Image (tube, rainbow, N blue to C red):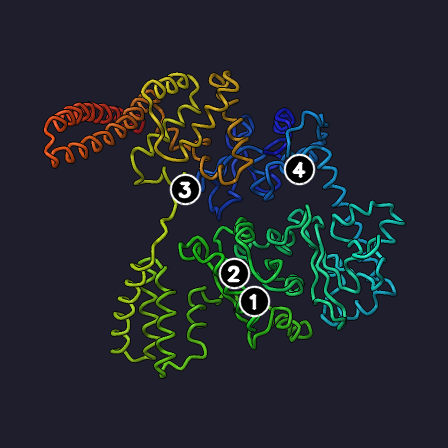
């Protein structure tokens, strides 16, 4: 939950003008009562994005994106629900509410906690200013020399707010505590000071280091990375510890600068080092970011994929052993998504094993640097898919003429190919057979068959994990009729308030349950809301607003249920005869239960008959006949309802 009062959230919704907010991201033109433009959430070529000023909602009739002003801000700015509310509150000069501490629910974000976070952010911003000032003072001369040796311009230093932590043990302490009167406890919580192990007092965490601020997506300093200056026996890089603001497994370095470029280029380049990101941005490759450490986490990947429609992700790690290990760990984190085609994953290897910073620094002068950027862009475009790169790594350094090397390569490749889908598996079996045969056509054909058998055996021996489908897939063409009718029943309940009481009572009287998890989940939340506020059953928009607010605060929940909370034109046409749709849906749901009972009684009858218990078998036979008659009646009812709906749709097409 957001921890913000519902009345305050509703006030923000009322004050914020959706057209005004959208117009900052999309060129809109008036079309009747609405505004239209190119959708910002996919590669739109004709205006399919509509904004309704009267209803204060938006909808793309191509990709399906839709919502209110809060949802739009969450999607375009990549904020949480609470952050989107506060973002709009600041924009429209709405004061955050002061809440009664005694009435505050346990664990929610009240004003005291918000103030605490803001104080931490303020302290980190002051520390960044201090480090930048130190870099430009006499004490930072060696640091400036080092940065200039890396060919970083003054503009780049200012953009990334690069600074220097002086070598003294209490330089930052003196400034923030003694001069700025900041509490020592807050500085420690921000990760800037370390308590002494012996005795009392604190000392600076970062000393004699180039300081690189780490920003959140909104561009606020939430931590630091310190690069050691000189050989001091200290770690080369020292990051801020985990704090209330900084979690290195969730932060992507440079994303605040790169997000617009990622969306424009429709791809993201993930490099290993901070200075790789900085050098690439300075050279104009602005869609580069870095993980906080050597391995990407699933959370970081999920964050990055929000910004690219094609989901094209290019990994570039050093060519040494540590870099190869990091690349393999990064691939493992998202391999299943890549296998399913949810990510277009590529691996970039630069010539002579260089990192991006070295590659660019080796080209001195404007013309050579321009050439280097052009070469880099070409290498990025030609970066092999992760599977091709993995195959290269398996074969690298192996002499396939030696039996031991050949068998090791074959075994590793069988394991690699076993997880692929049918079409891709056939393609790569052929490719791998050609590589192992080294151009021998007859041997290649034999090897392909051998590999196919080995992959089949490996797949049979290894249990396969079933993939889970998302709630929105229930409405796809070819999905089960029961799934579609359940969806339509829920949509009528939500968008046609006059049928709510009838639907709820019918489901209760006939003891009907939704068969699909997203539908059960939504129905449970509806019943919970109505039990607390019975008047919601009669108020169409109020119930929808409450459910949309719940979903907006939970991205996964919204993904599963948004197709039920927002109607496109095709769905509205399908629901033009709501009473018939309700009748067909109820019949379908009851039919499903009757068919399960029929199968259950049939199994019991088989068992009783095989055991020679004719009396019990006769009882089961009566139950089977009863269920059969009910099934026949329900099937006729479903068929009649569907025919009525088809005639309605045809009549609408002809008018």
Asked whether residue 473 is in view, the answer is: yes
Q: How far apart are marks 4 and 3 (CA)?
A: 30 Å
Picture coordinates of residue 172 (x, y %)?
Answer: 83, 55
Circle nearer the N terminus (2, 4): 4
Circle nearer the N terminus (1, 3): 1
> Which residue in the structure is indicated by mark 2?
330
Tell me the mark number nearer the camera, choosing from 1 and 4. Answer: 1
Q: Do the residues labelled 1 and 2 touch (CB within 8 Å)?
A: yes
Q: Which mark is residue 87?
A: 4
Tell me the mark number nearer the camera, choosing from 4 and 3. Answer: 3
* Count of numbered circles on the image: 4
Query: Along the line of sight, which residue is nearer the eye, 627 or 389?
Result: 627
Query: Quick one: SS at disc 4?
Result: helix
Graded by Cα atoms within 10 Å as few (under 14), some (14 to 19) or many (20 or more), the crowding at tag 2 reads many
Toward which corner of the image does residue 153 lie, by quadrant?
Answer: bottom right
Query: Quick one: SS at disc 3?
Result: loop
Query: Along the line of sight, which residue is nearer the eye, 317 or 579?
Result: 317
């Amino acid at each position: 939950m957001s921890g913000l009062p519902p009345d305050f959230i509703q006030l923000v919704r009322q004050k914020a003008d959706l057209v005004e907010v959208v117009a900052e991201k999309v060129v809109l033109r008036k079309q009747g009562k609405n505004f239209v433009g190119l959708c910002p959430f996919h590669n739109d070529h004709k205006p399919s994005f509509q904004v309704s000023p009267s209803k204060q909602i938006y909808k793309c009739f191509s990709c399906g994106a839709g919502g209110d002003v809060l949802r739009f801000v969450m999607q375009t700015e990549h904020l949480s629900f609470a952050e989107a509310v506060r973002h709009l509150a600041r924009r429209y000069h709405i004061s955050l509410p002061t809440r009664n501490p005694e009435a505050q629910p346990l664990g929610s974000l009240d004003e005291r906690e918000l103030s605490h976070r803001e104080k931490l952010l303020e302290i980190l911003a002051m520390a960044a200013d201090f480090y930048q000032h130190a870099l430009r003072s006499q004490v930072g001369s060696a640091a400036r020399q080092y940065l200039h040796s890396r060919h970083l311009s003054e503009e780049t230093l200012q953009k990334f707010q690069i600074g220097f932590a002086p070598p003294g043990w209490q330089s930052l302490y003196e400034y923030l505590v003694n001069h700025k009167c900041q509490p020592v406890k807050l500085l420690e919580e921000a990760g800037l000071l370390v308590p002494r192990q012996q005795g009392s007092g604190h000392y600076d965490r970062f000393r004699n280091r180039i300081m690189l601020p780490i920003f959140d997506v909104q561009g606020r300093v939430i931590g630091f990375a310190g690069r050691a200056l000189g050989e001091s026996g200290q770690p080369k890089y020292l990051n801020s510890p985990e704090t209330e603001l900084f979690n290195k497994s969730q932060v992507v370095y440079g994303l605040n600068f790169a997000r617009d470029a990622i969306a424009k280029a429709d791809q993201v380049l993930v490099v290993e080092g901070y200075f790789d990101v900085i050098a690439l941005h300075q050279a104009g490759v602005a869609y580069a970011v870095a993980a906080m450490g050597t391995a990407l986490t699933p959370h970081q990947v999920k964050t990055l994929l929000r910004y690219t429609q094609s989901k094209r992700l290019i990994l570039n790690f050093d060519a040494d052993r540590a870099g190869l290990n990091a690349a393999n760990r990064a691939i493992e984190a998202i391999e299943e998504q890549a296998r399913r085609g949810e990510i277009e994953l590529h691996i970039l290897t630069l010539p002579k094993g260089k990192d991006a910073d070295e590659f660019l620094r080796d080209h001195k002068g404007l013309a050579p640097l321009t050439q280097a950027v052009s070469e880099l862009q070409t290498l990025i475009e030609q970066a092999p898919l992760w599977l091709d790169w993995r195959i290269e790594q398996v074969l690298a350094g192996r002499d396939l003429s030696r039996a031991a090397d050949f068998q090791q390569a074959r075994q590793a490749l069988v394991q690699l190919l076993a997880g692929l889908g049918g079409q891709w598996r056939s393609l790569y079996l052929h490719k791998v057979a050609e590589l192992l045969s080294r151009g021998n056509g007859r041997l290649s054909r034999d090897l392909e068959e051998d590999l196919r058998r080995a992959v089949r055996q490996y797949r049979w021996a290894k249990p396969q994990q079933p993939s889970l489908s998302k709630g929105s897939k229930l409405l796809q063409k070819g999905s089960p009729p029961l799934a579609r009718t359940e969806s339509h029943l829920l949509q009528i309940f939500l968008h046609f308030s006059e049928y709510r009481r009838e639907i709820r009572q019918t489901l209760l009287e006939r003891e009907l349950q939704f068969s699909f998890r997203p539908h059960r989940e939504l129905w449970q939340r509806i019943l919970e809301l109505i039990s607390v506020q019975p008047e919601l059953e009669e108020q169409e928009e109020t119930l929808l607003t409450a459910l949309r607010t719940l979903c907006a605060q939970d991205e996964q929940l919204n993904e599963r249920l948004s197709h039920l909370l927002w109607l496109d034109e095709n769905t509205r046409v399908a629901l033009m005869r709501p009473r018939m749709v309700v009748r067909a849906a109820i019949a379908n749901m009851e039919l499903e239960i009757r068919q399960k009972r029929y199968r259950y009684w049939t199994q019991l009858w088989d068992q009783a008959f095989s055991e020679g218990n004719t009396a019990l078998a006769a009882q089961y036979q009566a139950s089977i006949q009863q269920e059969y008659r009910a099934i026949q009646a329900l099937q006729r009812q479903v068929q009649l309802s569907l025919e009525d709906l088809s005639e309605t749709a045809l009549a609408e097409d002809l008018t």
